[in-house]
């Protein structure tokens, strides 16, 4: 659809056009003022160099287009009484969204010192990209935002996550054409194949093509319109085009496009909800083509600026030093006719605000953008119903994630009516042994279904797409708008979302300091199919480093748990699903694993985070232990207990303490992490001077890093994954990385004073078994019977 008003039905009266244009000009004025002005916000005197900020930071190029979208969303929200949310994708569009928030009054309600008058306008301008102020992108501090603009690619998946299970919500999503070049954004177009028009809201993508990134043209903006249409239709959308640079014509065309899109959305939802239409709809979207830096300087220093990449950031860069730049800036600001837009006190005039919605209908005030206000407690069942019986440690086997799957099934069933819990993952729910959830909810799917398919459901709340980026974006959007969820993923491939989780952790850290932001449900990861049981898939599937990545982040927001068996996994998962404002990482196996603790013991142990397993050691309390065997993770725990059993048999006089760590942050000092131990606690658990042989699930140097300031650190010896991987047997994986039970016994002998000579024969036997194992697996293809058939005999 063209921007020529003669080619589209005119839905605006001249008065409505005047109201839209006044609001848009006001927002543009405020956006420019934020980038440039330190004083004289209303230009009540001629502009002087000292009125301009000494450091000019910000992004003008995208702001006029964002202001246009915001202005037109105001119109349709007010006219249709819509529940609406907008996700602002262009990275540094902060000036526009802040301007609109100030105009509608939500910014002043949130930050009372930024009043809607000249003084408040001056503070709004001064704080932007200024020390002690606010960022240049849409951020947690921005009312109405759920999307951090600091990194590109996630706006559309966030928008769909917000729309899931919010049937009355319309989520507009502005996608910058630079952002549209990213892999995560390209994949997230397919989210419409998972959107249920019966139970979900709608997403209205607005692809904003202003032609340029920071220094280059953008791919989609240079495609011929017919080719772009083919692409977008191939993604399942019905594009409406708004193109032009004449404000009046663009306003009329944008109003027509917005009304057409919302009419079609209403018809789709009505058909699905009333007539049970079973076909996947073709959802509308808007392609908005306007010049980059629209209404800004056309030319600076003899070079074109508007509609070029030079408009991306600060078009006039030497305003304090160059009189021509200063004159251009003043002319630019006065071109919006601020005297028509703001009264003598600096307040927006009634004509500017006539189209703005009221109360929570305003985009900056919608509760959907402050999801903690909508959050309800998750109905978690009592764990004893699912606990595995443990009459004796280490004699029975269960698949921990399969046991957890029963809990998740019942949580899914308990939320069937309220629809505020989702399980997401990249095609791995059943692979990760969580398929019990299908008894309560199938997999969301709006495409064709064949007879051979299983568990597909157009109304399902299990989300599977082979894109970790999209899974992460969906779940973030879902949590940020007041719901609960869990992300299940193969351990090695969760790294794909490293930078996405960075942004979410930063978001949580900032929102914790904003009293107006209500706490949201935590982002919970279940990492399974982990490094030690990827022996069949080989080296490419073996990487336990996500934990290292997470523990580098803000301690107040991150938690990492390594439950050693089924009951501890139940306890940890229950805690994580009840928590708020954290990123919880749970690493647990899906393969058969020995049960060590009863449910009551598991609760106590998980509450401690780390503790002594008295039944596994040989210390009698009359003296300090000779050595501490410690573990974190399911396979390391089994190897430590097998080593303890060997020591009990071969060196019965040795006083061995066995320590298990569930909460890995417990190893940090208490001053470094809220879950950290004091030095007294740490020394009491690990001793201050005895050898500690630590078998750890991941890279061994992480444990050294966490404990480097502790007493006895020079006595700490850590075994873990050393990037030795291949397709082999399960035990060969641990042996290849020197974390096997025999190597651990050898470590004890090497490090406990007096044992090197006295226990030389025992050490030799351990080495002989390792050599025998190597030959055995190459002949038989399976582990030694004494390993494969091992059980705890203590």
Image (tube, helix red, strand yellow):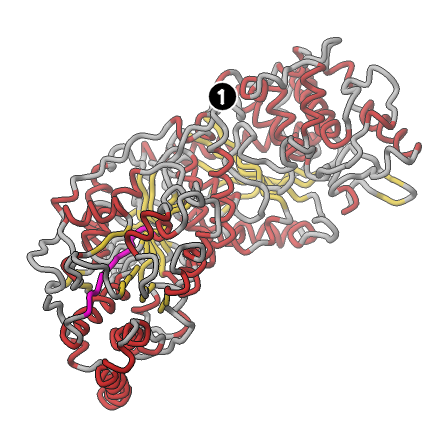
Q: Position of residue 653 (x, y in %)?
A: 16, 71
Quarter in which the N terminus is drawn = top right
Residue 123 image offset from top left, x and y in percent: 69, 22
Secondary structure of the magenta portion, mostly?
A: strand
> Circle 1 sits on which residue?
361
Task: Say above or below: 93 vs 566.
Answer: above
Q: Tag 1, which secondary structure?
A: helix
The location of residue 365, given as percent across then percent down, is 50, 23
Q: Quadrant of residue 116?
A: top right
Q: Is any atom of residue 253 visible in this view?
A: no
Lateral position of residue 359 relative to residue 249, left or right: left
Q: Residue at x 52, y 19 (%)?
A: 79
The one of 665 and 489 positioned closer to us in this rendering: 665
Q: Could you tell me which residue is drawn at 22 percent across and 82 percent down?
A: 762
Pick whichever, 390 or 419, lies toward us.
Answer: 390
Examine the image and state in which quarter residue 150 appears.
Answer: top right
Is residue 383 something one can see in this rendering?
yes
**Up-down relation of residue 529 to residue 570 (above or below):** below
**638 up-or-down from 333: above or below:** below
As for residue 657 lying within the magenta part, the answer is yes
Describe residue 306's horizontal placement relative to residue 128 as left or right: right
Q: Quadrant of the C terminus?
A: bottom left
Span shown in magenta: 654-663
């Amino acid at each position: 659809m063209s921007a020529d008003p003669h080619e589209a039905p005119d839905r605006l009266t001249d008065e409505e056009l005047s109201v839209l244009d006044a609001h848009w000009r006001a927002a543009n004025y405020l956006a420019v003022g934020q980038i440039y002005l330190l004083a004289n916000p209303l230009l009540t005197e001629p502009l002087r160099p000292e009125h301009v900020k000494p450091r000019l930071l910000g992004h003008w190029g995208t702001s006029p287009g964002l202001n246009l979208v915001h202005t037109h969303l105001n119109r349709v929200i007010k006219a249709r009484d819509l529940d609406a949310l907008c996700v602002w994708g262009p990275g540094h569009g902060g000036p526009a969204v802040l301007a609109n928030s100030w105009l509608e009054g939500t910014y002043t309600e949130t930050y009372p010192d930024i009043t809607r008058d000249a003084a408040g306008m001056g503070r709004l301008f001064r704080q932007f990209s200024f020390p002690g102020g606010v960022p240049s992108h849409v951020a947690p501090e921005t009312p109405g935002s759920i999307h951090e603009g600091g990194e590109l690619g996630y706006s559309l998946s966030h928008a769909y996550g917000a729309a899931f299970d919010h049937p009355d919500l319309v989520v507009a999503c502005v996608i910058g054409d630079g952002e549209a070049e990213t892999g995560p954004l390209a994949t997230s177009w397919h989210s419409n194949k998972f959107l249920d028009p019966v139970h979900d809201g709608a997403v209205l993508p607005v692809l904003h093509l202003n032609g340029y990134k920071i220094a280059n043209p953008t791919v989609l903006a240079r495609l011929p319109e017919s080719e772009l249409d083919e692409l977008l239709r191939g993604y399942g959308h019905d594009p409406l085009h708004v193109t032009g640079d004449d404000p009046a014509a663009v306003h009329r065309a944008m109003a027509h496009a917005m009304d057409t899109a919302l009419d079609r959305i209403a018809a789709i939802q009505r058909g699905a909800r009333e007539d049970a239409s079973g076909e996947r709809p073709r959802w509308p979207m808007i392609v908005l083509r306007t010049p980059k830096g629209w209404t800004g300087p056309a030319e600076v220093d003899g070079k074109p600026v508007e509609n070029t990449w030079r408009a991306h950031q600060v078009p006039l860069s030497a305003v304090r030093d160059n009189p021509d730049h200063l004159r251009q800036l003043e002319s630019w600001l006065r071109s919006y006719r601020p005297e028509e837009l703001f009264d003598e006190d600096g307040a927006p005039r009634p004509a500017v605000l006539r189209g703005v919605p009221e109360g929570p209908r305003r985009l900056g005030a919608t509760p959907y953008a402050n999801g903690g206000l909508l959050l309800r407690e998750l109905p978690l069942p009592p764990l004893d119903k699912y606990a595995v019986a443990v009459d004796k440690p280490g004699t029975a086997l269960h698949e921990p994630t399969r046991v957890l799957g029963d809990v998740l099934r019942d949580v899914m069933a308990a939320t069937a009516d309220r629809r505020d819990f989702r399980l997401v993952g990249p095609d791995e729910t059943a692979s990760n042994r969580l398929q019990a959830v299908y008894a309560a909810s199938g997999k969301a799917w709006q495409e064709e279904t064949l007879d051979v398919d299983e568990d597909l459901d157009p109304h399902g709340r299990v989300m599977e797409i082979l894109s970790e980026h999209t899974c992460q974006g969906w779940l973030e959007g879902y949590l940020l708008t007041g719901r609960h969820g869990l992300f299940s993923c193969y351990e090695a491939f969760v790294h794909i979302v490293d930078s996405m989780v960075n942004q979410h952790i930063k978001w949580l850290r900032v929102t914790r300091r904003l009293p107006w932001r209500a706490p949201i449900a935590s982002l919970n990861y279940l990492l399974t199919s982990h490094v030690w049981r990827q022996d069949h898939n080989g080296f490419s599937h073996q990487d336990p480093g996500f934990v290292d990545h997470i523990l580098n982040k803000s301690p107040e927001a991150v938690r990492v748990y390594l439950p050693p068996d089924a009951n501890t996994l139940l306890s940890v998962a229950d805690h994580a699903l009840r928590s708020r404002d954290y990123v919880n990482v749970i690493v647990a196996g899906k393969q058969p694993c020995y049960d060590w603790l009863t449910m009551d013991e598991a609760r106590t142990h998980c509450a401690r985070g780390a503790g002594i397993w008295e039944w596994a050691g040989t210390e009698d309390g009359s003296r300090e232990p000779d050595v501490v065997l410690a573990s974190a993770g399911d396979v390391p725990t089994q190897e430590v207990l097998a080593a303890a059993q060997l020591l009990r048999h071969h060196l019965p006089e040795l006083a061995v303490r066995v320590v298990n760590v569930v909460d890995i942050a417990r190893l940090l000092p208490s001053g470094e992490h809220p879950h950290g131990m004091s030095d007294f606690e740490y020394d009491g658990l690990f001793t201050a001077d005895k050898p500690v042989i630590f078998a750890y699930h991941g890279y061994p140097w992480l444990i050294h890093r966490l404990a480097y300031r502790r007493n006895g650190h020079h006595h700490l010896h850590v075994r873990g994954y050393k990037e030795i991987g291949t397709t082999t047997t399960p035990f060969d994986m641990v042996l290849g990385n020197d974390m096997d039970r025999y190597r651990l016994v050898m470590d004890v002998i090497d490090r406990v004073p007096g044992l090197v000579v006295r226990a030389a024969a025992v050490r030799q036997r351990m080495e002989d078994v390792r050599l025998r194992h190597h030959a055995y697996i190459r002949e038989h293809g399976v582990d030694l019977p004494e390993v494969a058939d091992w059980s705890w005999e203590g």
